[in-house]
Amino acid sequence: MAAEPEILEELRRLRSRVPHLTGALAASVDGLVIAQDTPGVEPEGMAALTAAALGVAVRLADATGQGDFRELLVRGAYGYVSTYSAGRTAVLTLLAQDGVSVGRLHLEGRRASARIGELVDSRAPVETPAKPARAPSRTGTPRTRTARTPRTTNARTSTES
């Protein structure tokens, strides 16, 4: 998928607004790169790992009753990886050094992910839910239930000796 100019520009503006931000990637939930500004990091691998982490995060949020996935934050020894939902089909992943203000990272990441989500969703076709197939109509006579006959006692299983 080709990088969208508006999304790439949003990533660059985000990097200029957040000190200590070292990379930004917009990807599909399937792990395909939409746009990236990640010097020193292989974007396809990062997008694939983001999709894997997203799958676990979505299941965890659902299993614990926390609702739809919104964001994921991973803190490593040298910094942060933060992933935000961006519309119906995309995510935004940010890389930041350890000295980043996590509050600022979240504030700007949420804003940027909302904007990216709008851009991606405006280009994606809206999927309409499939109509359930109708069961074929039955023809002929309706089935009726027959009464069951009572079970007989087996002589071998009786308690008489």
Image (cartoon, rainbow, N blue to C red):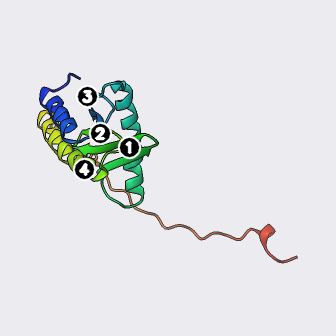
Three-letter code, disc 3: Asp
Three-letter code, disc 1: Asp
Query: Mark 4 — residue?
Result: 104
Label 2 – label 4 distance at C-alpha = 11 Å
Q: Earlier in the sequence, mark 3 or mark 4?
A: 3
Secondary structure beneath dot 3 equals strand
Q: Would you call the spot at circle 2 few (<14 residues within 10 Å), some (14-19), or many (20 or more)?
A: some
Secondary structure beneath dot 2 equals loop
* Residue 12 in picture, x, y percent from top left: 18, 32
- Determine whether label 1 and label 2 are within 8 Å by CB: yes
Label 3 – label 4 distance at C-alpha = 19 Å
Left or right for 51, reference 118? right
Residue at point 79% right, 74% down?
A: 158
Residue at point 56% right, 68% down?
A: 149
Q: Is residue 133 in view from this perspective?
A: no
The correct choice, above or below, for 83 with respect to 44 in the image is below
Query: Mark 3 — residue?
Result: 37
Q: Is 130 or 106 nearer to us in this picture?
A: 106
Label 3 – label 2 distance at C-alpha = 14 Å
* Residue 95 in picture, x, y percent from top left: 33, 37
Query: Mark 2 — residue?
Result: 20
Residue at point 20% right, 22% down?
A: 2
Q: Would you call the spot at circle 3 few (<14 residues within 10 Å), some (14-19), or many (20 or more)?
A: some
Label 1 – label 4 distance at C-alpha = 13 Å
* Residue 93 in picture, x, y percent from top left: 30, 38
Three-letter code, disc 2: His
Query: Mark 1 — residue?
Result: 98
- Determine whether label 3 and label 4 are within 8 Å by CB: no
Which one is in front in this view, the residue at disc 3 or the one at disc 2? Answer: 2
